[in-house]
Every structure is written in structure tokens, then in C-alpha cells.
Amino acid sequence: MNKNLVIDSFEQQYQPVFSSKSLGWNSIEAARYFLSPGHVSKNLPVHLLLLYLGEPSMMVQMGSTSTSNIFVKKGEHAFVPAGRRLEGNWSMDADFLFLNFDPIFMRSLLEASDIEANRIELLSHSFLPDQESEQLGQMLLREIHSSGFNTRLYAESLATTLALHLLRHYSTLQKREQSATRGLSKTQLRQTLEYVHEYYAQDLSVAELAAAANVSPSHFARLFKRTIGMAPHEYLIACRIECAKKLLLTEDISIHEIASQCGFADQSHLTRHFQRMVGVTPGELRKDRRNVLRLGRNVQDREGPSILHSFK
């Protein structure tokens, strides 16, 4: 890989534990870092995919106009296109896989598909789950240690697959291909639902959900409803109701505490939505647990299969 593609200042401060640098891989460079608490600020000459391999951790992400705290879990990844700035800090030990893609290589993939590369932009995003990116990243990491047949060819094939995945799902190419009559893609829907199921107890915004799906906030609500038949806030309430039902049936804590744990403003807020969606109040459900199966069927009849399907 071209020496110009190395993140010089970062590598002066940190040394990778493992790296593909000496293996002669074309188009991509993989390096694993065990980082002590610190800070990074660097303009990138490469497209960088960061795969987090450590324990769940709070990090600070700094943008050009705002600073935000983000909770990162193992297997989540972030992406920063070439020409952008990688900037952030972490307060505890962190384990990262850095995957640096040669911009010329990414352009060649587009040109091979008769797509005008100058009209396609890769989009940066913060840490989010993506099973395919995680699997391919882990496979590339294993190839650093492999002495098997055609290791270089296999690694470069994996890099091509991962690069195409990024182009399909994290670029304006995906946005252009998504017509006005379509909803969210399968990947976008999965990422959105995973985010909601993880953080439904928090005060989520449309902008946060749109970021999880890598969709413009101005279009997200319409695309989400077109895909599953519910508005984002309706789906969020459904998740909170599922949380409340579970706690009412399994925990001996107050309804006020259940409302707080599940993301409702207060007990009356929970009761109003619970009675509307389940048909009884939270107190009535707790008093008569023998009706759980019957009530579950009523909820499915009332809300349709799309809600319960998402919880399977």
C-alpha cells in the first residue's frame, strides 16, 4: 500500500499490535491497536473503517459543529472517508481494528461498474452495528496471522467485498438507487430496529434514528413508515410497552418505576398507552396474570404482525 496512506501522526503515538503492512496487501491495510486512554485528531488521506473489538465503552466524538458522548459496543464500526477528519477521545483502554482503504481502489470499483466516481460520495457515520462489516473485518484480522494458501489473494478478495458493502450501504450511491416508492433497505431497517431495541428507554430523536439508518432526517420518518407500516414514534411506544409488559409479569417493582425504566414520562403516560394498545391498564394486567396469553393474542390482532415480528 502506498506510504502516503499511512496515518503518520497517529502511528507516531501508537504502534499496532498486529498489522498487514509487511504482507504486501494491495488496496487495504489492516492494523489492530490496543490503545490506552487518549485522543486522536487527524485529517485522513484514506477511507478508514474503525471496528471496535473491546468491552463496551463511552467515547467522545467531536465534529465540526458539536461534541457528543457515544456508547460503543464490541463489533460496532465507524467510517470516515478520505479527506475528512478523524477526531475523538476515549477514557479507558480501547481495542480497535483500523482498516484503511486506498481511495484509488474504491474509485476503480465504481468505474468497473460503469459508475461515474466523481458523482458518488462515501458518507461518514458514527459507531453502529453491522454484522457483515464485523464479519469481514474479523476475517481480515485472522488473515494477518494466517500462513495458508494464497493468503494475499484471499485478503484482497475480502477487502473488495467489504469495500463494495460500504459503497452499497454508506454512500450516495445507495441513496440515489433508493427510489421514492421504496422504503428502508433491509440493512437500514435492521440497523434502525437494533438501535431502537437497545435505546428505547432513552429520549430518542428522529435525527438519531436517521443516523443509525444512514438516511437523511427529512426522509427517515416517511421511509420508516412505508417499510413497516408504523411511524417511528409509534414503534418506539410499542417497544416500551413490550418492556412494561415483561416487567409487570416478572418483577415486583412499582408501576411508577416500570414507567421510568421503560422510557415513559411518568406512570400516567404508561397507563394511557398501555390501555390503548393492550386493552387493560398495567395494574389490571399485574392482578390477573392468567390472561397473559389471551392478552398477547389481542395485542397481535390489534397492532398487526409487523410489531411482534420485530421482537422475534
Image (cartoon, grey):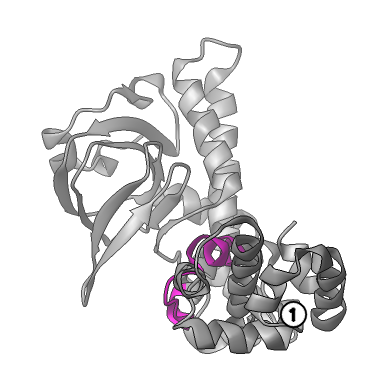
- Which residue does the numbered mark 1 point to in the structure image? 278
Q: Is residue 184 left or right of residue 42?
A: right
Q: In this view, does 244 lie to the left or right of 146?
A: right
The residue closer to the viewer here, 198 or 44, is 198
Q: In this view, does 263 lie above or below 45?
A: below
The residue closer to the viewer here, 31 or 242, is 242
Q: Is residue 155 magenta?
A: no
Q: How many marks?
A: 1
Magenta-colored span = 190-208
Judged by its main secondary structure, the magenta piece is helix
Determine if residue 101 is in view: no
Q: In which quarter of the image is the N terminus?
A: top left
Residue 108 x %, y %: 53, 52
Give the quarter of the image for residue 54: top left
Q: Does the magenta stretch include residue 202?
A: yes
Residue depicted at 40% across the width and 20% down the height = 23
Residue 249 x %, y %: 66, 61
Determine if residue 248 is in view: yes
Residue depicted at 45% across the width and 76% down the height = 204
Query: Mark 1: which amino acid?
Result: Val
